[in-house]
Image: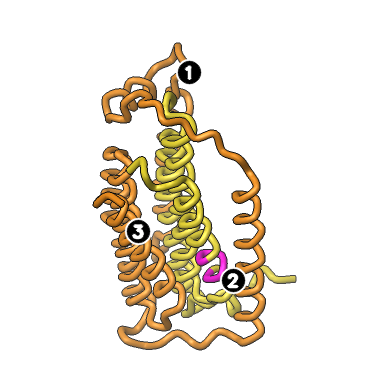
Chain colours: A orange, B yellow
Amino acid sequence: MSASTIIFYIVSALVLVFGAMSVFTRKIFRAAIYLLFSLIGIAGIYILMNMDFIAALQVLIYVGGIIVLIIFSIFLTHQAGDKLPKPLFKRIVAGASMAAFGLIVVLGVFYKTAFKVTTEAGIDHSARSIGRQMLDYHHHGYVYPFEIVSFLLLAALVGCIVIAVKIQKK
Amino acid sequence: MEQVPLAHLLILSSALFFLGIYGFFTRRNMITMLMSVELILNSVNINFIAFNKYLFPNQLEGIFFTLFIIAVAAAEVSLAIAIIINLFRKFNTVDVEEVDTMKF
């Protein structure tokens, strides 16, 4: 086992533990902080897979944007330090059995499928080649979905303002 | 990183996915349900990146799917939080059970 393999197992254990704590804790602010650590661990897994650009985007958008937004909304809607109510026992049983059944089915499918893992080097995953293919409109480029996503982001921006604006009553 | 088998990455991502599923079905608070959806989306991203890295290293398609998922997730979270804040103004709660105006 090389050092990067050991680091991978440590980081993935951290991701799973913090994800589980984020799901099971009853204090909502702590759930957000545990989710933050889990997302940082996922960025570490991307770095271990040599996907530097995706790791940078993960830290930038999820950790820097989405978690901050969630924490803001927690402060706007909750008293500091109050606990969430305990989930109903019937709901815990239903959710846990569904999750366990789905996990067994998915892992069974993975176990039966013979993936053809290739060990060839492949092309580089640098931001340069990603950007070149994304903005290309001849050779399997992705400029059309790129434009659609930019339009979607604009629509979401306007929609957020329209939904969350406070209408002044005269 | 070539030593880690693909199966271990898949086990990690599917465990994270079903943690998110469990949280989504047991929580009744809208913000924590949103956090569970984030966990689900991130596990799918890990799967896309792992398949791109191990099975098709000559292409970049998995990276593009991940990029678009991240963009759509950002839009989705911002809209969801706008809706949650609006509902909190109207009902003074973020519990999904108590927001039942449109229930028939």
Is residue A166 something that shows in the picture? yes
Q: Which residue is drawn at 32% across and 68% down?
A: A71
Residue with the mark numbered 3: A9
Marks 1 and 3, how far apart at CA: 36 Å
Disc 2 crowd rating (10 Å Cα; few below 14, some 14-19, many 20+) is some
Is B100 in front, or is B28?
B28
Task: Say which amino acid is labelled 3.
Answer: Tyr
Is A170 in front, or is A94?
A94
Q: Residue B23: x, y in percent?
A: 52, 71
Disc 3 crowd rating (10 Å Cα; few below 14, some 14-19, many 20+) is some
Task: Say which amino acid is labelled 1.
Answer: His
Q: Residue A17 sits in which quadrant?
A: bottom left
Q: Which residue is drawn at 40% across and 50% down?
A: B74
Discs 1 and 3 lie in a common subunit: yes
| Relative to A65, residue A31 above or below | below
The boundaries of the magenta stretch are B19-23
